[in-house]
Image: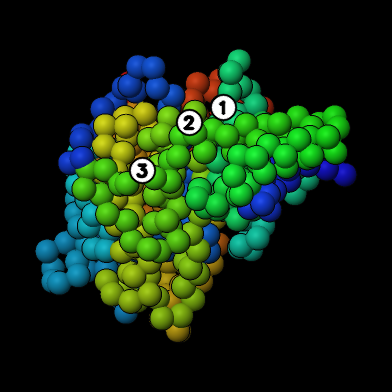
Amino acid sequence: MIHRRLFLKSSGLALVAGGFLPGTFVRMAAAATPGRRRALVVVFQRGAVDGLNMVVPYAEKAYYDARPSIAIPRPGQKEGAAIDLDGFFGLHPSLEPLAALYRDRSLAFVHAAGSPDPTRSHFDAQDFLESGTPGRKSTRDGFLSRALAVTTPAAASPLRAVAVTPALPRILAGEAGALAIPSLDRFGVRGGSEKNAAFEAAYGAESGGPLAATAKESFEAVRLVQKAAPEKLAPANGATYSSTPLARSMKQIAQLLRADVGLEVAFADVGGWDTHAGQGGSQGQLAGRLRDFGATLNAFSRDLGSRMSDVTLVTVSEFGRTVRENGNRGTDHGHANVLSVMGGGVAGGKVYGRWPGLAPSALFEGRDLAVTTDFRDVFAELLEARLGVTALGGVFPGWTRGRPLGLTAA
């Protein structure tokens, strides 16, 4: 049985948030702005993005041997070529908006990273990643909720943790409390202050114990959003967001951060990465998804400008895809993948992780890129350096820390 308080905190806050209650880009500094809270933003690419075509190991012949029709050409070779990163890896051309951030050392990648669990089930892999306990299905809460629970300040904001999703995601479920806000302009009770007060009084009167506390926190969050009115903040610094679901989510996270409502952890997800057929190379299905992805992250960083010194953003997917393309010019469920890390405190301009190679003898189960960096090692460094989490054993139970990556700037 789910712990009563966990259930009430998660479902109660998501209920309110779900609407059931009627400049020029400024170079990111390594140090956070004094007096402003640091924030971690997580973007989940659901469906297993093809990390080998996202950050391309173009110097490895085996990559081209395995992908005769979907490989990204080497830099400078012809139109649609990869954008060189370090002489070995290149960026998919659709991610060109992120190239300047990499050169500016505000963006890094961690390749051959992922979960040590070998599952190729989307459901299980996403669950293991969000719970932070690979291979263990009995974990009830998410690792970001546990991280928040061990760092709760005396005066935590009711908007401390927000997912811009229709329902509270697994990664934020837990006793720390979090909000699911699919749309800022529809958050709360509509109909004026009198109806708002009457509904709050009625809801509070009907509630008791932990549910009453949850209701109180929920209405405090509503009042804070209404007072700050983040949805009225237009993008700054010439940033332009498209109308895609990911762009709408990231725009709202930027609005919450700029409104200074006490946001410390934000979450968004985007699907459509399960490219079993017709994946394409420099053009096509995956390229289109990556084009929106790169443009949106670029707009987000531009929108926040100097505030990005207080924000660290990480992108992750449940697993990678097969090294060899299949008979439908796509790729199947794989193992290791690539994570992106950008923003304040990131020692960027580098592709991190130990590269295992794509030779047949180096592949996991003879078909996939092998995991050499546990995803928990990446998040541990970020949680520790950016949010001050020290009790990492409680955040990732059963985890043995690997060699530090050095991903965060001093």
Looking at the picture, tell me which residue is in the foreground, 62 or 143: 143
Camera sees residue 188: yes
Which residue bears the numbered disc 2?
Answer: 261
Percent x, y of residue 287: 32, 69
Which residue bears the numbered disc 1?
Answer: 157
Work out which residue is located at the far bottom of the displayed protein and give it. 327
Q: Residues within 10 Å of mark 2 (few under 14, many from 20)?
A: many
Using the numbered discs, state the Cα–Cα distance from disc 2 to disc 1 in whole angstroms: 7 Å
Residue at 31% x, 39% y: name it: 304
Residue at 64% x, 63% y: name it: 121
Which corner quadrant holds the N terminus? Answer: top right
Indicate which disc, 1 or 3, sits on the residue closer to the N terminus.
1
Residue at 85% x, 38% y: name it: 206
Which of the 4 image quarters holds residue 67? bottom left
Which of the 4 image quarters holds residue 94? bottom left
Indicate which disc, 2 or 3, sits on the residue closer to the N terminus.
3
- Give the numbered dot on residue 233: 3
At label 3, the amino acid type is Leu
Looking at the picture, tell me which residue is in the foreground, 239 or 394: 239
Give the tally of numbered discs.
3
**In the figure, is residue 347 to the left or right of 80?**
right
**In the figure, is residue 171 to the left or right of 228?**
right
Indicate which disc, 2 or 1, sits on the residue closer to the N terminus.
1
Picture colour scheme: rainbow
Percent x, y of residue 254: 39, 42
- Does the CB distance between marks 2 and 3 fall below 8 Å? no
Using the numbered discs, state the Cα–Cα distance from disc 1 to disc 3 in whole angstroms: 20 Å
Q: Residues within 10 Å of mark 1 (few under 14, many from 20)?
A: some
- Does the CB distance between marks 2 and 1 fall below 8 Å? yes
At label 2, the amino acid type is Val
Which of the 4 image quarters holds residue 119? bottom right
Above or below, 341 against 269 in this view is above
